[in-house]
Amino acid sequence: MNQPNLVLRQIFVLALILTASMAVTLRANFLDNSDFKEDMSSWHGDGSAAFLKPDGTEGDESDPGVIPVIKLKTSPGETRLVYQEFETPDKPTTLHVKVDVFASADFKRSAHASDYTINWKAGGTWYWSAIAIPNVDFWIRGGGSSWFYKLANLKPGTWTTVDGRFEGLPEDQDRVVNFCIPCGEGTVYLKNPVVEP
């Protein structure tokens, strides 16, 4: 093979490698519709689409400064959640899950011990074989063949970033992430959900 053809072939291979790596980079977030621009497309559960104004109250899409969010209204008798199923074709054993959470001014979780199944503390990360309802304001629950949890308490009227890094996970391709709130009063809003390797 002559020198110009060899150089062209090397450039072509390099271009393919760069294109493949850019595709992986662009798909860093396993979640679809994470900006909620398609309302509740790809999201399931108890959430609904809403727009939040800078002052923390709900508004319309045309209001200045509003952002699209998922709204979870609490219930006095049961937990609420919104979830998305997703695929991880490379079956990573580590996942990074992050979401910004805003509690309304009237948000308050239930004070009844019977509304919870486990007494884990906010800030903790847990791996468990079953679905649990911890005594906290908010939790990420993810899974495939087993469950992983990140727990948080919220300060009403303030955005809180709940950020969990989960390691040693089974090599599952099909997974789910749940964003959960306990029984109580008030409303919780979500923005910027991310699940990445």
Image: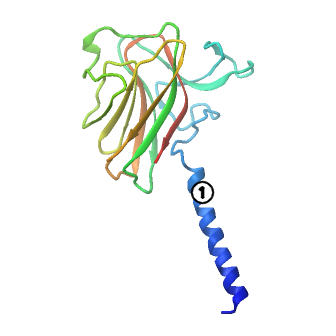
Residue topped by disc 1: 23
Q: Secondary structure at mark 1?
A: helix
Measuring from the top left, give residue 194's x and y in whole percent: 51, 38
- In this image, 20 relative to 141: left or right? right
Q: Quadrant of residue 13?
A: bottom right
Callout 1: few (<14), some (14-19), or many (20+) C-alpha neighbours within 10 Å? few
Residue at figure coordinates x 42%, y 32% from the top left: 178
Residue at coordinates 32% horizontally, 8% vertically from top-left?
Answer: 111
Question: Going 44% across and 41% down the picture, which residue do you hit?
Answer: 96
Task: Give the residue drawn at x 66%, y 85%.
Answer: 6
Along the viewing direction, whichever of 90 and 161 lies nearer the viewer: 161
Q: Is residue 3 above or below residue 88?
A: below
Residue 33's quadrant in the figure? top right
Compare residues 181 and 121 and report the one nearer the observer.
Answer: 121
- Relative image position of residue 137 (x, y in whole percent): 40, 18
The picture places residue 35, in percent across and down from the top left corner, at 61, 34
154 on left or right of 77? right
Q: Quadrant of the N terminus?
A: bottom right
Q: Is residue 178 above or below residue 27?
A: above
Amino acid type, label 1: Ala
Give coordinates of residue 175: x percent, y percent.
40, 44
Q: Is residue 190 left or right of residue 66?
A: left
